[in-house]
Amino acid sequence: MTFSHLHKQLFKKRGDLLFFFFVLSCLFSLIFILLFLNSCNRRSELEGSWVGCEVRRPLIDWTLTIKGNQFSLVREDLNVWYKGFLRLNKNCRLKKIDLEIIDAVAQISCGKTSLGIYEVDGDTLTIIATDPGDHLRPLSFDEPCKSSEFFFTKKNSGFETASKSSRIP
């Protein structure tokens, strides 16, 4: 076997190997792009507008609006509201929600976090959350203790014209 013949065979195998790595890197790039686009377009099960009440005070309605990682919770008379960011943890048996309040009618709540648990069953949402700043998360839906318990129903976006949260002073 001559040096020229050996060089041609090595070059061919090296070319095949380079082509293989090129295809493999293109495949990984495509998978990464698809995963990124999927995560950008994925909506949380909580995203949208919800109307409901605090269980202990059922005559006063609240509107909860969630978009991305932001929320607003507004009482029907518009005299009480909370706005901020939420974090979800669905990796446990009880789904956890942390509501970081950045704006509220009661300025003492601003900068504090309300720890809670939530459950979605079809078009209904139940949230049990502590007062902002309390450091003990509710442990179950059976014993809300000092926490506030809210029961919401998903709004039908086709029939609603304006959100109450858009009228916050």
Image: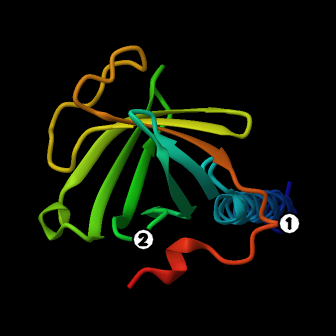
Q: Nearer the viewer, residue 45 or 148?
A: 148
At label 1, the amino acid type is Lys
The residue located at (38%, 85%) in the rendering is 169
The residue furthest left is: 108
Residue 149 x/y as whole percent = 40, 34
Check the image and name the residue furthest to the bottom: 169
On-image quarter of the N terminus = bottom right
Is residue 1 shown left or right of residue 35? right
The spot of residue 48 in percent (x, y) is 65, 59
Q: Residues within 10 Å of mark 1 (few under 14, many from 20)?
A: few
Residue sitting at x 48%, y 30%? 91
The residue that mark 2 highlights is 78
What's the residue at 33%, 16% (across, down)? 143
Res. 47 in view: no
In the displayed structure, does residue 164 sit left or right of residue 99?
Answer: right
* Sequence order check, earlier mark of 2 and 1: 1
Is 89 situated above or below 81?
above
Query: Residue 50, relative to residue 8: is it above or below?
Result: above
Pick whichever, 127 or 29, lies toward us: 127
Q: Which residue does the numbered mark 1 point to in the structure image? A: 8
Q: Position of residue 164 (x, y in %)?
A: 55, 73
- Secondary structure at badge 2 equals loop
Q: Quadrant of residue 134?
A: top left
Tell me which corner region of the image, top left, top right, bottom left or bottom right, holds residue 22.
bottom right
**Residue most toward the front?**
59
Q: What's the amino acid at mark 2?
A: Leu
Whether residue 43 is visible? yes
Element on which disc 1 rests: helix
- The numbered dot on residue 81 is none
Image quarter of residue 10: bottom right
For this rendering, which residue is in front, 84 or 82? 82
Give the vertical position of 82 relative to 113 (above or below): below
